[in-house]
Amino acid sequence: MQCVLRRSGRILFAAQLVLGMGYGGPGAEPGWAQGGPGISMEASLHVVHDALFASFLPVDDLPNDPRTTGLLIAARDGIWQQAGSSPAFQRILQPFEDLRGFGNACGIAQAIQSSGATSFAALDATERQKVLSLMQHCEANAPRQLAATARNFYIVKGYGAVQQQLTGVKVNLYAPPDYSKAHMPLLAPTRLVYDIEKKEIAEK
């Protein structure tokens, strides 16, 4: 789990860049860090995290497979425990905590109008997928990138945490130098050589 969490650092950094661009459009309401009445911001973001996790991994869709469900729940809770206090992670979640922040961009305002909900967590599964689809196909760049960042974040961390238990296969993503050297492909001899000073390929 910890290895997977470290690998997600680059995703969190990318999210900071994306969120720095802003979203908005006419009608956007400023400030996502507003919890609902009587609800702390931490609790609001926690339920958003659970909702996003369930949108990308089948934690609620396997009633006949309690073992896999248990592994996914442990992965979900482990992600929150490890990353919940990270400002970069919170900035991924905050736009989903109050979808009004997107304004009229992407058609999200119209999509959630009938439900009366403003938090991604308050939507049902179908409505959540609709919002994510609108973001992924949005003409505005920032919502589209945020949707991709959230998807990559949860799939990498979620499946990375459970794949070994489910498959029995340990995936080593970091090959030691001796292994790399032993498996380096042998290329046929060539008369060409790269001149590092001139930055060009020349014949010997």
Image: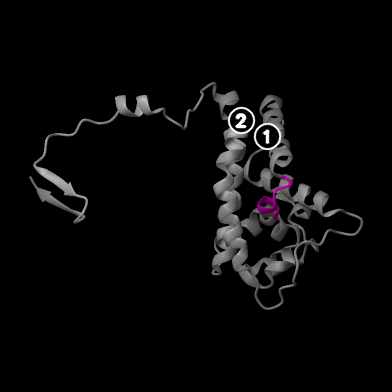
Amino acid type, callout 1: Ala
Please tell me which residue is depicted at 65% across the width and 75% down the height of the picture.
25
Pointer 2: what residue? 162
Please tell me which residue is depicted at 61% across the width and 30% down the height of the picture.
162
In the rendered image, the quadrant that contains the N terminus is top right
| Residue that extends furthest to the top in the rendered view of this protein | 168
Q: Position of residue 105 (x, y in %)?
A: 63, 71
| Residue that extends furthest to the right in the rendered view of this protein | 38
| Residue that extends furthest to the bottom in the rendered view of this protein | 26
For this rendering, which residue is in front, 150 or 195?
195
Q: CA distance from mark 2 to mark 1?
A: 7 Å
Q: Is residue 108 visible?
A: yes
29 to 125, vertically: above or below: below
Amino acid type, callout 2: Val
Crowd class of label 2 (few under 14; some 14 to 19; many from 20; radius 10 Å): some
Instruction: Label 1, secondary structure: give it.
Output: helix
Crowd class of label 1 (few under 14; some 14 to 19; many from 20; radius 10 Å): many
Magenta region: which residues? 84-90
Q: Is residue 60 visible?
A: no
| Residue 87 part of the magenta segment | yes
Q: Are marks 2 and 1 in contact (CB under 8 Å)?
A: yes
For this rendering, which residue is in front, 7 or 124?
7
| Residue 49 part of the magenta segment | no
Q: Position of residue 138 (x, y in %)?
A: 56, 66
Q: Position of residue 151 (x, y in %)?
A: 58, 49
Instruction: Label 2, secondary structure: give it.
Output: helix
The mark that comes first in sequence, 2 or 1, is 1
Pointer 1: what residue? 75
